Image: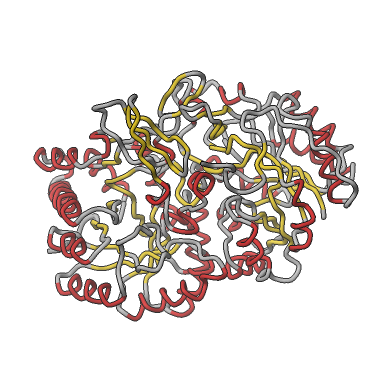
């Protein structure tokens, strides 16, 4: 079982992003996904910055993959996608536009492509997909069905740690709750380093708002199920970045690294985010 | 009688009476789903048996209208055989088009039934021409239904570059999330549009009367609370009132309906091929009213787009049918990016 660090879903300040990836170079993970998946207006890092981070991580022996934007509407977004694809890097395709552009070269089918059956998986495999990230909403039984149908050589990656990306919109929720217009958003999403928690009127943490993305408030943590996924034939577990204020991320990586080596479990640090952990696709302990 | 010279009016049918209502009131096309849990309105008591669908298709064809069959969930391996059987059945009973989202199922339909039009469902989440190029080149789709996230200018661009017929939503409930990319319902109820064809399913809804008002709960989660006398809406997850930054608000979306009556000339100028009415879960009477109103508006717009004004009587009729009695242009009115 290998470990990956998924794309940074939040809008952090530039020095924080560099510091995060500098630390990752030394961390016990196999693959790192870079790039902006949520909002094309976030430009604290230029493509050259990402390229520099990529070379550092590659030099440290990590597999580096560029994740593409999930919701693509504007011509400028398609142009940016074309630039990434032509830069001869491996991409994680999060929209069929990326599959269309990268088709024929090896790529990762990201969690935002809808892959729910063997036929679709084989189709993407024939176009170059070498790994696919299971949709977040699949439960273990549905995943097992799909694993039984995957083509030879297709790796499966599962989102194993982090607030779950559940939905995308044309609307910026971070701006909306602060009564900002999206077109004049002032990048307020940057104020929420781990997303903005939304509560029910009974103060139960429900969602987290991250720009145009809605996430779960709860952090999915599958560390207790690592061997189950290993047995099922999953090759890679994805850890989604959080700020150290939410959870000491290096300790999360360390705990998962122990777990995948089959060593005695190291305690996974508690999450300071409202909502705590859940271990499945569903909200837990619901009454 | 249907008229194909302008924008096509595509109306919903959750039952045979609704199909009749749509056709009788001027729909150019009607879309429906089978009673097999494989379409995005998988509600109890709704949808068509194969026999009813066949009868509906005959009824529509005799009156010059077309029928599209929606098979737009993403089938799991255990439901693959049922999904392909449904594609075969739709082709066999003479459906004019299949509305599909799943790439594997599109490939199947293209191979087995090349003569039946394939439309990419809104559930296919294609929001740009490059993604549509993928579906056109691989599966020969003829038309795509766009997610409700694009401005009119963006819709126009997609039409120019994709070389496809483009269908957009014109009236009905508004999804604020990109269709096909929303797992909010999955997270809270375990059932989702992508897998089961449902969002915030009715069986998970519980109404609780409290002295302070009426609570709407979804699988136990408090989605909203309505004060005595306040109109209580269905607890669709994205339309609930939640607490963010210390205030209670519609944090994701207000309960409003989409209504493009005011911008029909712009949509026509953009080259839109069809306007879709949401609401297969609605009654035949609702379908009749909405169809009649949009038919009149489309005809007026086609006759004289320059001086088009939404016909007052029909605009008022639609207003009465909107969720929360308010409507929006959604993303259509966003400034060009």
Question: Quadrant of the rendered structure where residue B51 is?
Answer: bottom left
In the displayed structure image, the side of residue A260 where residue B102 appears, left or right = left
Residue at 47% from the left image edge and 75% from the top image edge: B84
| Residue at image point 54% right, 34% down | A207
Judged left or right of residue B234, residue B161 is: right
x and y, in percent, of residue A148 in the image: 68, 70
Query: Image point 20% across, 73% down: which residue?
Result: B61
The quadrant in which the N terminus of chain B is found is bottom left
Picture colour scheme: secondary structure
Quadrant in the rendering for residue B232: top left
Q: Say if B336 sits above or below A67 in the image.
A: above
Which residue reaches farthest left?
B313
Residue toward you, B79 or A25: B79
Report x, y in % for residue B100: 43, 64
Along the viewing direction, whichever of B227 and A31 lies nearer the viewer: B227
* Residue B36 position (above or below residue B297): below
Q: Residue at x 81, y 39 (%)?
A: A253
Left of B152 or right of it: where is B228?
left
Residue A47 visible to an observer of this rendering: yes
Does residue A182 appear anywhere in the picture?
A: no
Q: Nearer the viewer, residue A100 or B175?
A: B175
Q: Is residue B159 left or right of residue B279?
A: right
Q: How many labels, in total? A: 0
Residue B203 lies, in percent from the top left, at 40, 51
Camera-side residue of A183 and A1: A1
Residue A212 in the image, given as x and y percentages of width and height: 52, 35
Quadrant in the picture for residue A10: top right
Which residue is at the far top?
B246
């Amino acid at each position: 079982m290998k470990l990956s660090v998924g794309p940074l879903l939040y809008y952090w300040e530039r020095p924080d992003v560099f510091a995060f990836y500098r630390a990752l170079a030394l961390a016990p993970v196999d693959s790192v996904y870079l790039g902006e998946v949520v909002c094309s207006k976030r430009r604290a890092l230029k493509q050259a910055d990402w390229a520099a981070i990529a070379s550092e991580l590659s030099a440290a022996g990590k597999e580096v993959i560029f994740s593409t934007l999930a919701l693509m509407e504007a011509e400028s977004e398609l142009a940016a996608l074309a630039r990434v694809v032509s830069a001869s890097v491996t991409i994680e395709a999060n929209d069929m536009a990326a599959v269309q552009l990268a088709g024929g070269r090896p790529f990762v089918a990201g969690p935002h492509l809808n892959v729910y059956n063997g036929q679709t998986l084989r189709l993407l495999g024939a176009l170059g997909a070498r790994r696919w990230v299971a949709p977040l909403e699949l439960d273990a039984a549905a995943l097992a069905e799909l694993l039984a149908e995957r083509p030879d050589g297709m790796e499966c990656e599962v989102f194993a740690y982090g607030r779950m990306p559940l939905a995308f919109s044309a609307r910026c929720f971070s701006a909306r709750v602060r009564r900002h217009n999206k077109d004049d958003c002032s990048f307020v999403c940057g104020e929420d380093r781990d997303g903005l928690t939304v509560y029910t009127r009974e103060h139960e943490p429900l969602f987290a708002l991250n720009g145009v993305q809605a996430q779960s408030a709860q952090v999915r943590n599958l560390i207790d199920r690592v061997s189950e996924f290993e047995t099922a034939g999953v090759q890679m577990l994805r850890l989604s970045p959080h700020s150290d204020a939410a959870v000491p991320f290096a300790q999360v990586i360390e705990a998962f690294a122990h777990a995948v080596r089959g060593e005695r479990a190291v305690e996974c640090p508690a999450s300071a985010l409202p909502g705590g952990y859940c271990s499945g696709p569903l909200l837990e302990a619901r009454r | 009688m249907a008229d194909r010279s302008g924008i096509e009016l595509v109306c919903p049918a959750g039952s045979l009476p609704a199909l009749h209502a749509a056709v009788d009131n001027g729909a150019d096309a009607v879309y429906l789903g089978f009673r097999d849990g494989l379409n995005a309105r998988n509600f109890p008591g709704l949808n068509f048996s194969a026999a009813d669908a066949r009868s509906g298709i005959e009824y529509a064809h005799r009156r010059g209208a077309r029928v599209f069959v929606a098979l737009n969930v993403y089938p799991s391996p255990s439901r693959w055989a049922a999904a392909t059987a449904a594609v075969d059945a739709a082709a066999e009973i003479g459906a004019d088009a299949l509305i599909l989202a799943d790439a594997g199922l599109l490939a199947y339909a293209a191979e087995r039934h090349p003569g039946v039009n394939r439309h990419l469902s809104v559930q296919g989440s294609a929001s740009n021409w490059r993604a549509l190029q993928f579906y056109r080149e691989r599966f020969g789709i003829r038309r795509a239904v766009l997610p409700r996230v694009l401005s009119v200018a963006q819709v126009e661009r997609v039409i120019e570059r994709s070389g496809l017929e483009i269908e957009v939503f014109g009236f009905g409930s508004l999804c604020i999330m990109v269709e096909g990319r929303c797992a909010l319902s999955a997270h809270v109820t375990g059932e989702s549009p992508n897998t089961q064809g449902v969002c915030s399913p009715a069986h998970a809804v519980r109404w609780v009367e409290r002295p302070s008002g009426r609570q709407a709960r979804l699988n136990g989660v408090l989605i909203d609370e309505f004060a005595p006398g306040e109109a209580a809406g269905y607890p669709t997850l994205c339309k609930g009132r939640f607490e963010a930054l210390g205030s209670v608000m519609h944090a994701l979306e207000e309960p409003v309906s989409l209504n493009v009556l005011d911008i029909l000339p712009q949509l026509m100028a953009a080259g839109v091929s069809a306007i879709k009415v949401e609401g297969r879960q609605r009654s035949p009477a609702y379908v009749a009213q909405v169809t009649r109103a949009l038919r009149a508006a489309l005809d007026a717009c086609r006759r004289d787009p320059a001086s088009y004004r939404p016909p007052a009587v029909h605009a008022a009729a639609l207003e009465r049918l909107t969720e929360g009695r308010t409507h929006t242009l959604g993303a259509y009115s966003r400034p060009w990016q």
